[in-house]
Image (cartoon, rainbow, N blue to C red):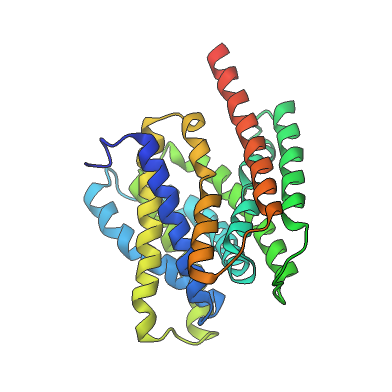
Amino acid sequence: MRPSSAPPMLLAFLAIALLCAMDAAIKFGAQTHTIITVTFMRYAAGALLALPLMLRFGKAPVSRDALQGHAVRGLVIAAAAYLFFYGLWAIPIAEAIAISFIAPLLVPLIARVLLGERMRLINVAACLVGFGGVLVTVTGHVSMPTPNRTEGVAAVFVSAVLYALSVVLLRQRATRDDPQVISFLAAAFPALYTAPFALLAAPLPAPGAIPLFALMGALGTGGILLLAYAYARAEAQKLVVFEYTALGWGALLGWLLFGESVRPQVIVGGAIVAGACLMAAWSERRKAAAA
């Protein structure tokens, strides 16, 4: 079955699974390499995999305007990725994913500031509810606290803000650039920005770790492409629920690979944030139907 003909919901489900597996591979790599090395290698591998796809299936050459736009977005992506990868190293995968759910709720606020888009009351309410869910997620007793837990939680939260900013910047490019161009540049620029730090200020990765980094790039590129196919053929409101299967995948992979237990607060908090996102998404759907 080709991705272009597969059911969009199945593609979204598989895409989230691949991206969560990438998170697990990143957490594994961060145990033996610096975070900046992991960040660079993940995007360098992703760019090498995305380049032939762009050359083969891209319908238009990369324009100067696209390079300028994605250069700015790539800087935001690099910072967001570094902070999120640090969070994956410092706290359990499921908890990091639950906190990152706040990102979709921040998109309307940032779009209001940068693009002048109207922000409705339902978006404000959803953002407040979602923030409450994040507070629930990070509370409660932690049986095996890590020395960097506070920094890890803060890093994931700031990463979510930056990720929301990258989504708004993507809106400015999505109608102008091919998906293959977006996929390549979204990996190439973060790799370019992190290269000096990874190659000059951190130990080079051991040759034996190259397959792991290649796996990160393959899982990331595969997940993003499947999501692109899914969202090209189905409404976001129909697919958004599958984004929240990430909490289940994160909990399962964290338990299987790292022996991480999932606190009840993480499940409850993640459910609150997911519910807030669905509330806002369904409101947008009713608004579109009425129009």
Quarter of the image with the N terminus is top left
Residue 224, percent from left and from top: 40, 50
**In the image, residue 271 above or below residue 70:** above
Say above or below: 33 vs 287: below
Q: Is residue 246 left or right of residue 9?
A: right
* Vertical position of residue 209 compared to residue 47: above or below: below
Residue closest to the eye, 245 or 192: 245
Residue 51 in the figure: left or right of residue 93: left
Q: Can you tell which quarter of the image residue 213 is in?
A: bottom left
Out of 156 and 75, give the one closest to the viewer.
156
Residue 80 % position (x, y): 59, 60
Residue located at (70% from left, 62% from top): 153
Residue at x 77% of width, y 39% of height = 128
The total number of labels drawn is 0
* Nearest the eye: 153 or 260: 260
In the picture, the quarter occupied by the C terminus is top right
Left or right: 5, with 287 as reference point = left
Horizontal and vertical percent for residue 20?
47, 57
Q: Quadrant of residue 274?
A: top right
Determine if residue 120 is in view. Answer: no
Residue at the spot x=45%, y=68% of the render?
25
Query: Is any part of residue 116 visible from this angle?
Result: yes
Q: Residue 85: percent from the left, percent from the top?
A: 56, 66
